[in-house]
Image (cartoon, coloured by chain):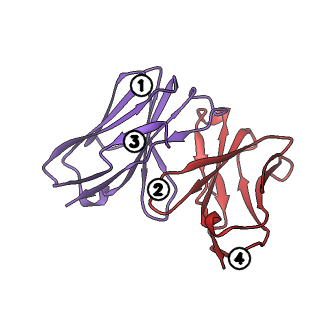
Chain colours: A red, B purple
Amino acid sequence: RKEVEQDPGPFNVPEGATVAFNCTYSNSASQSFFWYRQDCRKEPKLLMSVYSSGNEDGRFTAQLNRASQYISLLIRDSKLSDSATYLCVGGAYNAGNMLTFGGGTRLMVKP
Amino acid sequence: DTEVTQTPKHLVMGMTNKKSLKCEQHMGHRAMYWYKQKAKKPPELMFVYSYEKLSINESVPSRFSPECPNSSLLNLHLHALQPEDSALYLCASSQDQGNNSPLHFGNGTRLTVT
């Protein structure tokens, strides 16, 4: 089983829709989580950190559910420019402090 | 604009060539990383430097040789590569190697081995 798993998608949604991605992690000792956005042939860019209390930044909301070992990313009022691959990243102290990437979820927002 | 800069942006090399990838950051980060990314796959960790010392080598073949000349610079020396080594090579940095520190990626070097 992969340490961090994501549905690869693609998620095809119309502009203005609300879309949510989940990411599950297997290491219960995982402490830190991040969402990255990666455009085609570009580098991953940090979208937001995920805190225990949740995190909101404009149209984006990230939440952590430790009991079920998943994190989520909610995008409201989707824009065409939100089309990208979203990478979930988790890290655990008992894994050499290294961050582990999920496989990514592809989002396509259509007019 | 990225705060981690990588050169070159593109590189084409033959299997007998020797080339180097360069990475620079001026954020005062103490951890620097090399990742390899193939199409439609997540980045795959290759090396980690922490405080200028190699702390992790993810069983990378010796034809890839990292070097950290100082706290701001990270190089990846390439020699006798194979066509399957063609990929996007990403440099990243973080405040430290602790996993509370997010990674900041450079633009990457797109490498083609012919």
B42 to the left or right of A64 = left
- The image position of residue A4, as x and y in percent, is 65, 53
The image quadrant where one finds the N terminus of chain A is: bottom right
Residue of label 1:
B72
In the rendered view, tell whether residue A60 sits above or below residue B97.
below
Q: Secondary structure at mark 1?
A: loop
Q: Residues within 10 Å of mark 4 (few under 14, many from 20)?
A: some
Q: Are marks 1 and 4 on the same chain?
A: no
Q: Which mark is residue B59?
A: 3
Of A27 and A54, which appears nearest the observer?
Answer: A54
The amino acid type of the residue labelled 4 equals Val
Q: Are marks 4 and 2 in contact (CB under 8 Å)?
A: no
Q: CA distance from mark 1 to mark 3?
A: 24 Å
Q: Are marks 4 and 3 on the same chain?
A: no
Q: Residue at x 76, y 72 (%)?
A: A16
The amino acid type of the residue labelled 3 equals Ser
The amino acid type of the residue labelled 1 equals Ser
Q: Are marks 2 and 3 on the same chain?
A: no
> In this orientation, does residue A106 appear?
no
The image quadrant where one finds the C terminus of chain A is: bottom right
The number of callouts visible is: 4
- The image position of residue A68, as x and y in percent, is 84, 53
Q: CA distance from mark 1 to mark 4?
A: 42 Å
Q: Are marks 2 and 1 on the same chain?
A: no
Q: Secondary structure at mark 4?
A: strand
Q: CA distance from mark 4 to mark 3?
A: 40 Å
In the rendered view, tell whether residue A46 sits above or below residue B68.
below
Residue of label 2:
A42
Residue of label 4:
A13
Q: CA distance from mark 2 to mark 3?
A: 26 Å
